[in-house]
Image (cartoon, rainbow, N blue to C red):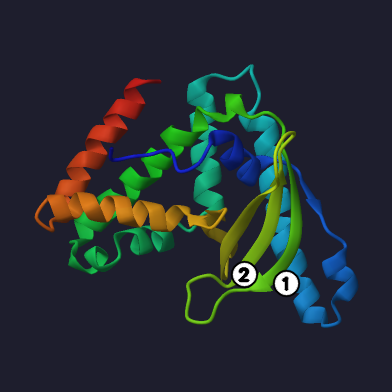
Amino acid sequence: MLIRSWFPVSILAAALFIPAVFSSVQAAAATDLLAISQDEEAKSFIRTLSGQALQTMLRHDISDAERTRYFREMFRTTADLEAIGRFVLGRHWHKATADERVEFLKLFESITVYTWSRRFKEYSGQGLTVIRVRSGTAGMEEDVVVESTINPSQGAPVSVLWKLKRSEKGLHIIDLVVEGISMAVTYRSEYGAVIHRSGGEVGGLLAALRAKVGELRGDD
């Protein structure tokens, strides 16, 4: 199947939108003012994401179309779409034409938005705790990694890593890693398989994505 649900929606909803509880251990142990400032920047980013977003996305008095519209706006402001898209396509990004890249990013955004915006009705109120903020791995895309856990009402805590990239416009999400499973890597593997089955042509993936977007849009 071309587009899978990466993780149980309750986990994704919790990771993206629940009000977070921030551990005081990190701040108490920190001695470098710059490190503290950067840590607070990352924590503030998640606070903002999980605050107003949650209140809007989980309202029952708005239509699915309104929820989708809001999710799209939020995704555009909090995620680095091009960085994610470049990673997901991998070596195929360089093979793709400029028009194919533009279309891929538009389709990828739409699939993300349509897939997840309608599923937050299933959210059941998990809690999230930020454990610590650390620098990204040398040579990797991320500048900051926020380590957190989701605390379900039943069962063991779930590990969630937020991989964030910094630019002049601030921090943006480039990946979520839930219990060791990367969303971006999952898409990269899945889409790469589609391209392989299409004779190595990005156009084959685009055709499949167009069909999926049409299917998801038709459900609205």
- Taking 190 as reference, is 118 left or right? right
Q: What amino acid is at disc 2?
A: Val
Mark carried by residue 144: 2
Using a 10 Å C-alpha cutoff, classify the residue at mark 1 as few (fewer than 14 neighbours), some (14 to 19) or many (20 or more): some
Quadrant placement of the N terminus: top left
Residue 104: % across, % down: 28, 51
- Picture coordinates of residue 178, whole percent (x, y): 56, 52
Name the spot of residue 86 as percent of width and height, x first. 35, 63
Q: Residue at x 49, y 49 (%)?
A: 76
Q: Secondary structure at mark 2?
A: strand
Instruction: Look at the numbered discs 2 and 1 and tell me whether their residues touch, using CB distance below 8 Å.
Output: yes
Q: Secondary structure at mark 1?
A: helix
Q: Is residue 108 left or right of residue 205?
A: right
Q: Give neighbour class at mark 2: few <14, some 14-19, many 20+ (Cα, 10 Å).
A: many
Query: Outermost residue, top direction?
Result: 61
Q: Residue furthest left?
A: 199
Q: Residue at x 76, y 60 (%)?
A: 131
Direction from residue 95 to residue 154 in the image, left or right = right
Query: Compared with residue 211, is residue 7 higher up or lower down, i.e. above or below?
Result: below
Q: Kindly identify the residue that appears in the image at 14 percent across and 50 percent down.
A: 197
Position above or below: 73 against 32: above
* Residue holding disc 1: 38
Left or right side of 106 for 142: right
Per the model, the C-alpha gap separating discs 2 and 1 is: 9 Å
Image disc number at residue 71: none
Of the image marks 2 and 1, the number of the one nearer the N terminus:
1
* Residue 106 pos. (x, y %): 33, 46
Please name whichever residue, 117 or 176, is drawn nearer the observer in this view of the structure. Answer: 176
- Amino acid bearing label 1: Gln
- Could you say which quadrant of the image residue 93 lies in? bottom left
Which quadrant is the C terminus positioned in? top left
Please identify, in this view, whether the residue under mark 2 or under mark 1 is nearer the observer.
2
